[in-house]
């Protein structure tokens, strides 16, 4: 498993999102209550970039059609049709640096 630098913890304040391309995947990183989470950045409904959505606590709303995702697990919280969960990834913090493990 490779560790990829996302940035400094100070670059992703609480309640904010960022994104990177890692291992050929688009990945969203979110700071929820001081804990960092990562999941697929491309909505599996219609391909929206989820980092452009709105984060409210752990609930991320897709900017295109309003699907609601749990950024801590990648699970779908709400949408009129059933969508598969988004892939989630492990995040670690070392000396104030956020790492994505892929």
Image (cartoon, rainbow, N blue to C red):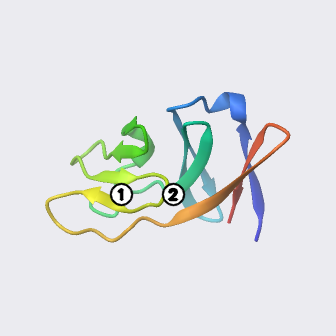
Disc 2 + disc 1, Cβ < 8 Å: no
Q: CA distance from mark 2 to mark 1?
A: 10 Å
Q: Locate residue 75, reporting x and y percent.
A: 38, 62
Residue 79 sits in quarter: bottom left
Q: Secondary structure at mark 2?
A: strand
Q: Locate residue 92, reporting x and y percent.
A: 73, 53
> Which sits in the foreground, 47 or 94?
94
Residue in the image at 70% along x and 28% along y: 10
| Residue 27 shows in this picture | no
Specify whether 40 is left or right of 68.
Answer: right
Instruction: Determine the residue located farthest toward the right in the rendered image.
Output: 95
Number of marks in picture: 2
Residue in the image at 43% along x and 45% along y: 58
Q: Locate residue 2, reporting x and y percent.
A: 77, 66
Q: Nearer the viewer, mark 2 or mark 1?
A: 2
Residue in the image at 47% along x and 60% along y: 73
Query: Which residue carries the number 2 mark?
Result: 39
Q: Residues within 10 Å of mark 2 (few under 14, many from 20)?
A: many
Instruction: Determine the residue located farthest toward the front in the rendered image.
Output: 33
Specify whether 48 is left or right of 31.
Answer: left
> Which sits in the foreground, 66 or 21?
66
The quadrant of the image that shows the N terminus is bottom right
Say which mark, if any, is on residue 43: 1
Vertical position of residue 38 compared to residue 84: above or below = above
The quadrant of the image that shows the C terminus is bottom right
Q: Locate residue 39, reporting x and y percent.
A: 51, 57
> Which sits in the foreground, 71 or 101?
71
Vertical position of residue 43 compared to residue 58: above or below = below
């Amino acid at each position: 498993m490779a560790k990829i630098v996302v940035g400094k913890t100070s670059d992703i304040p609480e309640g904010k999102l960022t994104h990177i391309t890692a291992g050929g995947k688009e990945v969203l990183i979110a700071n929820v209550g001081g804990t960092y989470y990562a999941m697929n950045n491309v909505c599996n409904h219609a391909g929206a970039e989820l980092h452009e959505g709105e984060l409210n606590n752990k609930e991320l709303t897709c900017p295109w059609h309003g699907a609601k995702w749990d950024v801590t697990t990648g699970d779908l919280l709400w949408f009129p049709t059933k969508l598969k969960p988004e892939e989630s990834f492990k995040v670690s913090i070392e000396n104030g640096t956020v790492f994505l493990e892929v």
